[in-house]
Amino acid sequence: VKKKSSNTIKMNWVLLFKIIYLSITIILVIRVIIQIVQLIFRYYQSEKSKHLHFTILTNSNSKNSFSFFNWIFINKETSLNNDKDKIIAHEIIHATQYHSIDLILVELLSAVMWFNPIIWMVRKSIQLIHEYLADEGVLNTGIDKLSYQALLINQMTEEKLINISSSFNHSLIK
């Protein structure tokens, strides 16, 4: 009888771990879905203009400039700024290199493997690599290095609000 009760206890622990794992995974997947829905709402709330085959979305609610696929979100104040072209160039690099796909995949992978600390380091590294690639791409277009560095430093205090977007303000070169 004692063996039977100890097996029952083991099964309850396994069930408990499965429930905890699935609960956290579902919460993290829902978080990704909410972020995508937030982007769609921002899209519809923003003023739209075309630049090449990209949609520039200007909104006073967007604190930071960021891109999601071919959508480039820019704060209304930034859109009046002289640095607008540099920021758009940075976001175009993210869009043309399909960084949004990488970010969605790594977010979903993080949701499934949330218990593994390596996935969180990989997630951070991918975001960092994306920023280096975008910064390198901007500098390769002929933009002055010193003025671009000054722009990055001026943007340093801004924070990224939506993780599945590529943000101009996330660069570590600054």
Image (tube, rainbow, N blue to C red):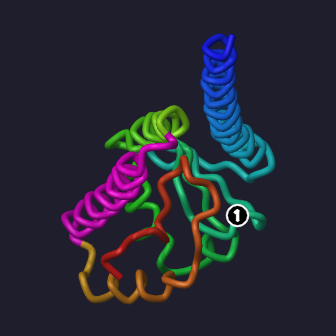
- Span colored in magenta: 114-142
The answer to which quarter of the image holds residue 102 is: top left
Q: Indicate whether 9 appears above or below 28.
A: above
Instruction: Report if residue 101 lies within the magenta region.
Output: no
Who's the residue at 68% across and 44% down the image? 35
Q: Nearer the viewer, residue 69 or 34?
A: 34
Q: Which residue is mark 1?
A: 62
Percent of width and height locating residue 8 = 68, 16
Q: Is the N terminus in the top left, top right, bottom left or bottom right quadrant?
A: top right
The residue type indicated by label 1 comes to Ser
Asked whether 164 or 54 is in front, the reply is: 164
Q: Main secondary structure of the magenta part?
A: helix
Whether residue 69 is visible: no
Mark 1: give few (<14), some (14-19) or many (20+) Cα within 10 Å. Answer: some
Along the line of sight, the residue nearer the viewer: 66 or 121:
121
Question: Residue 138: within the magenta?
Answer: yes
In the displayed structure, 114 sits above or below 21; it is: below
Q: Nearer the viewer, residue 7 or 80?
A: 7
- State the image coordinates of residue 37 (x, y, percent, origin top left): 73, 38
Q: Is residue 7 visible?
A: yes
Please tell me which residue is depicted at 74% across the width and 49% down the height of the picture: 42
SS for callout 1: loop
Residue 141 place in picture, x, y as percent: 23, 64
